[in-house]
Image (spheres, rainbow, N blue to C red):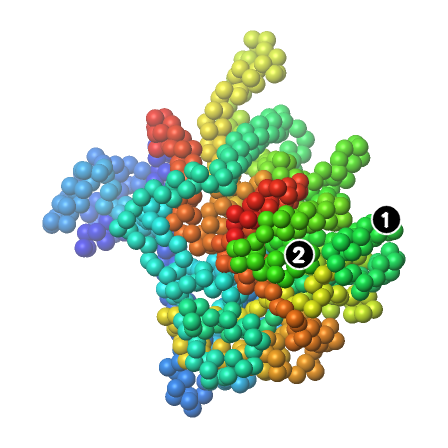
Amino acid sequence: MPGIVSRLRRAVGGDSDTTADTTGTDARPDGGTVTEGTRRERRGPIERVGQSLDDRFGGDFVESLPFWLPPFLLMGLFVYGAIVWNLLISLTDYQGFAQAPDYGNLDFEMYVRAATDSGVIDATINTFILIVAFTSATLVIGLALAILIDRGIRFENTFRTIYLLPMSLSFVVTAQFWLWMYNFNNGVVNIALGTFGIGPIDWIGNSSIVLWAVIFALVWQFSGYAMVVYLAGLRAIPSEHYEAAKVDGASTLRMYRRVIIPQLKGATISASVVLMVFALKAFDFLYSLVSNFRPPNGADILATKMVREAYSNQNWAFGAAIAIILFAMALSIIGPYLVYQYRRGNL
Amino acid sequence: MMDDSISRRRFVQATGLASAVALAGCSGGDGGDGSDGGDGDGGSDGGDGGSGSMGTLEVLHGWTGGDGAKAAEELTTVFEEQHPDIETEFNPIGGGGNENLDAVVANRLQSGDPPSSFANWPGPNLLRYEGALGTVDDVWADAGFEDVMVDEAVDLHKQGGSFRAVPLGSHRLNCLFYNIDVVEEAGVDPDSLDSVSAFADALDTVATETDKIPMTHGMQGTWTTTQLWAAMMLGQEGFDAYMNFIGGDGDESSVRATFETTATVLENYINDDASTIGLTGSNENIINGEAAFIHQGNWAAGAYRNAEDFAYDEDWGFVPFPGTDGMYTLHFDSFLYPSNNPSPEASKTWLEFVGSEDAQIAFNQFKGSIPTRTDVSMDQFGPFLQETAEDFANAEARPPTLQHGLAVEREKMTALNDVISSEFTGPYNVDAATSGFMDAI
């Protein structure tokens, strides 16, 4: 036990020389040089177990235990445990309050029901459209803004702040904004279009438009985020690349298309994963838009459908099945990204 | 390279430390919460030994704003005056049509941690809580509620032969409110509207004679349209057709006819921005003199009472929805009693109080609803509610509300609203909506 404590103290102390000195076992001149190769005096069985664990799982396994173990357990229980439990519930026929879910009789009935439920199918299609259209539009606009700002314009910081500001607002606020702006009679959008002789358009009430109106509002909110990610990517590109392209006689358009944008692949992938996850969370926005679980006709997504089935109808198993479908969609987005990052050695 | 590894190590250490601290903070907070729940019995003088064993009375309800909040506060004040020995914890949970309240209640019932009592609708709505409600037969017997409550309340508060809840107040659903200036400008006499077709003619007159909105409607949620459809059905097809429909034995032609009329009204006579506004915004149109009529439950009148210079019979008026004269479309706000109750005695005391004269007067005069007891003096109520109570007592029929739990169980109600949402929020597809409704019930 004292061994662990001293290891802990050393780990907490980091590269502070005084702490390292007081532990006495191995003084570290500076924290950065301690690696697996560092020789230590071994005492007692605990130390030996620690050493074998270190050998098995890589250095610092025992030292780092207090830091990653509690979050690991919490994540394991509340995230991954909950997912597994949810999967189990979706295989039962659980509904109402009267009986506990019957785990003895598992089948895929709820998934069959979901596949034949026109509401779920519509919601799935809407969710898919939302993810694809929102992500691609946000990336394009974010890239355009980033390139413009990166050209060294005046008031660069001001513009950056202005574009990023909407993202700092809560969905509740932006949904309310857009609800007012989309008002048929006195909304800003229709008034502005009216000056060009267009409209008025019933943005929320028309079931073939409403999803696009929602996507537009979300793009407005998140293009600033995409801009910041791209801006960081652009800043990391050495100016030699620009100069070389110029020397070789490339036009500005060609330079960006052939030289600069290909180098933003990493930024694009990171940003699109985050944006897709935001798209899956559009529940908040839709809920705030209508202040209930039923979005306007034509904008129902899996998340709202799931909450309605679970909490309005007490169809827990069916709601859980929809949740698993949503989870599978999210996983199909995140999974390839993780694989990609792993292959590149970033994980 | 060296710098990079140092900073990464530092970063990991700092993160680890921060999350460890955060974790400690969390668990500390939890402990604090626990002790919060434990104390707070400053109110009891210790004179009554029984009070300790009764447990804290925890009541969940959804009245967080406006009239509702005031009424709930009044209700709890009176209760605490009458029962100073009971520890109480009233938790209002606001948000869209009780959806958040329902979700909280659902979670707590499911996890075996029910509140002492919670507000909801009785009737078929109780089915969603089947197996999770305890019996309060003794409360009804002791207080003699069966004799004093309106007849319909007796059946609607039973499930499986036992009472599960106690009613607090009732709203009327078949209401048509109007702005007097606007109808006078159009030359329409609301009192003469004795049928749905007369009502449609009146809307047309308003449209041609004035530049106001004939009927204001908020379609942000689907519930307003569902409840309008129910009123239309009652007014046009009559009590029997309506009761057959909710009983699952509906006549397809009367459902279709109702949808046709409703579609005519919604297509031609409502505000253009209906899809972006809810009840509050819609009701503003009446108060501001922008619209002639609105169909709503009589909670809408609460906004008129709170508006400045907007008096009953001078600025706004009321008639029963055309064709439903002599009917009172029934709604109940009730308190339900969960089984596995954390404080059975206190909960039953609370429910007995809810059904009492004092409670019903205290709550309903501010909420804009009326007592469900028939023996309560209406002196403290305004003229509008006095008239409502009179209609309530003298009603020839009290059909249950479709949208508020008394007519059909929750899942069917959701299905009906799904149909309205997908087929009847414009464009109005009468065929699909009719078959959807027939399938849903």
Give the residue drawn at x 77%, y 40%.
A191
Q: Position of residue B66 (x, y in %)?
A: 65, 66
Badge 2 and badge 1 in a common chain:
yes
Q: Is there any visible trace of residue B342 in the rendered image?
A: yes
Chain for numbered disc 1: B
Give the residue drawn at x 56%, y 78%.
B149
Within 10 Å of disc 2 (Cα), the crowding (few <14, some 14-19, many 20+) is some
Q: Nearer the viewer, residue A87 or B432?
A: B432
Q: Position of residue B322 (x, y in %)?
A: 73, 60
Name of the residue lying farthest toward the left: A44
Question: Marks 2/1: CA distance?
Answer: 27 Å
- What residue type is disc 1 on? Thr
Q: Nearer the viewer, residue B12 or A6?
A: B12
Q: Is there any visible trace of residue B13 in the rendered image?
A: no
- What residue type is disc 2 on? Glu
Using the image, determine if residue B355 lies above or below residue A51: below
Name of the residue lying farthest toward the bottom: B47
The disc at residue B208 is 1
Work out whether mark 2 precedes mark 1 in sequence or the reverse, and give the earlier one.
1
The quadrant of the rendering that contains the C terminus of chain A is top left
The answer to whether the residues at label 2 and label 1 have Cβ atoms under 8 Å apart is: no
Chain for numbered disc 2: B
Using the image, determine if residue A327 lies above or below residue B34: above
The quadrant of the rendering that contains the N terminus of chain A is bottom left
Q: Is residue A137 left or right of residue A19?
A: right
Q: Secondary structure at mark 2?
A: helix
Q: Position of residue B294 (x, y in %)?
A: 73, 58
The disc at residue B237 is 2
Within 10 Å of disc 1 (Cα), the crowding (few <14, some 14-19, many 20+) is few
Give the residue drawn at x 49%, y 62%.
B124
Q: Nearer the viewer, residue A201 or A109?
A: A109
